Amino acid sequence: MAYIQGEDRTQGALFPVSLDDLIPDDHLVRVIEAYILRLDLQQLGFSKSQPKATGRPPYNPADLLKLYIYGYFHRIRSSRRLEAEAQRNVEVMWLLGRLTPDFKTIADFRRDNGPAFTATCRAFVQFCRRVGLIAGELVAIDGSKFQVVASNRKHITPNKLKHQEAALEKRIARYLAQLDETDRSEGGESVNRSAVQAALRELETKKADNQTCQALMEAQGLTQHVLGEPEARKMRTAAGKFVAYNIQSAVDAAHCLIFHHEVTQDGTDNQQLEPMAKAAKAELAQSELTVTADAGYSNGEQFQACEAAGITAFVPANRSVNPTSDEVTFFGREDFVYNAEDDQYRCPAGKVLTLKQLNKGARIYHSAVGDCSTCPLKPQCTKAQRRYVSRHAQEEAFERMEKRMRAHPEMMVKRRSIVEHPFGNLKQWLFGNGRFLVRHLRGARAEMSLAVLGYNLKRALKVLGASQMRGLMS
Ligand code: SF4
């Protein structure tokens, strides 16, 4: 049986085919075109959005923005690959009217328009809000670390520098000893003196650079620094420690759209609940908001601040664990009754625990040694002479949070189903578990805005379909 045959390449067409004929009505590029047409690029802050009267005409920022949105939608992030797509991809040819900007023009546009990309991403969020894709009833907050351009080898600390300096000194001493040995030896030169001296000069230069680095870090009070990426920080991830940024996102439960994101330098999520929840509330322009996040966001002060701001948070309270052994689990904090009037705890044996000290905002209470030494419940309470119980400065906020979580255990399941989908998409699908392509916090912000815009566009298309979206945009 014969194979299916393609057309003869030299076959002429009776009716010339236009680019527009090749693009179906419900194609993504038509949606991108419709969306860009409704934007005021000057208001969004794009450079060259008003062409000058003289000089060589620049590319229209609208065309380059279309190219980037198309690229991030299709996991094409590199400027060289975008350049190639403009030359060979019919969809991009349609989108750009066959313009073929070179990779440098494409890269410069991304480098120069970071805040404008963020504004465009927000404009799309506002569009989604207007057409009902973002409900604002439940918001999940989560963070994920994305590696930066610089590798771990570029990460320095004062300790690392001191070790490097010591290693350099050892090598310098070895070379000097070689030169001494040569001077002393009777048979004349056994090593190449000029080569050793050149190597010594190089080592001395490295040592001087190292000392300058140490002095600068000390003067600026830095505990770590990444060469070429000074705003990045070394962060712990599931796959090890990497130089990265911590990306925070607020995701709406209705259709898993990311409606607010931040690129942060914090290695943990512990300080992020309040700023993210407040920013999400402002973005949605609501007087009240319900948010959920994982235990990494547990923070008594921020629980309280969220309550004061009209934000109901559902976060597992991360408390110190009750001491246990193989044989016995000791009484937990909940077994001790707090009396606010006396500022004392009463233990299961009815004895009083009084305030001993304050430690980093926590209040530490202890029992009397005399009470514990004769107590029949001691084997269930402590192995020490007396029992200690700590009370967080925002204990009431913790207790209210624990009560909320007990009343709504389903919140953690909901959180997972809402927030893990976007990060799975962004990190594994779009970034391919790779790094940012653009340096510095500014560049990472630009790239993340494009990535979030690409992700949100994909979600919106999935829910509404291209035809309906074009209709809503016109
Ligand atoms: S061991 Fe001390 S603190 Fe514990 S129940 Fe007995 S008296 Fe109370």
Image (cartoon, grey):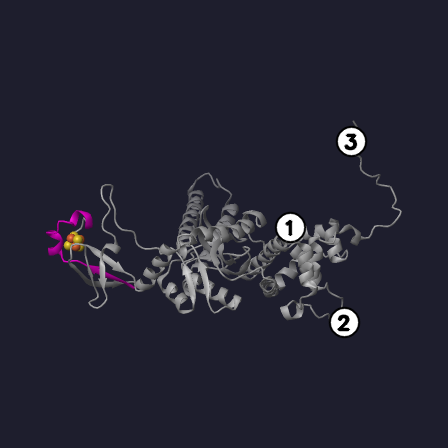
Secondary structure type for disc 2: loop
Q: Is residue 79 left or right of residue 157?
A: right
Residue 3: mark in rendering: 3
Tell me the mark number nearer the camera, choosing from 3 and 1.
Answer: 3
**Distance in Å between CA atoms under marks 3 and 1:** 32 Å
> Residue 323: percent from the left, percent from the top?
25, 49
Confirm whether the magenta stretch covers residue 369. Answer: yes
Residue at horizontal 23 percent and vertical 54 percent from the top: 335
Return the disc, 3 or 1, that comes first in the chain's sequence. 3
Nearer the observer, 175 or 310: 310
Nearer the observer, 24 or 109: 24
Tell me the mark number nearer the camera, choosing from 2 and 1.
Answer: 1
Which quadrant contains ligand 1?
Answer: bottom left
Nearer the observer, 373 or 335: 335
| Quadrant including the N terminus | top right
Secondary structure type for disc 1: loop
> Residue 218: percent from the left, percent from the top?
41, 62
Secondary structure type for disc 3: loop
Return the disc, 2 or 3, that comes first in the chain's sequence. 3
Mark 1: few, some, or many residues within 10 Å (few <14, many ≥20)? some
Figure quadrant of residue 317: bottom left
Q: Amino acid at mark 1?
A: His
Q: Which residues are magenta?
A: 361-381
Residue reaching furthest to the bottom: 53
Residue at horizontal 82 percent and vertical 39 percent from the top: 7
**Distance in Å between CA atoms under marks 2 and 3:** 58 Å
Residue that carries the numbered disc 2 in the rendered image: 54
Q: Is residue 257 left or right of residue 312?
A: right
Tell me the mark number nearer the camera, choosing from 2 and 3.
Answer: 3
Residue that carries the numbered disc 1 in the rendered image: 74
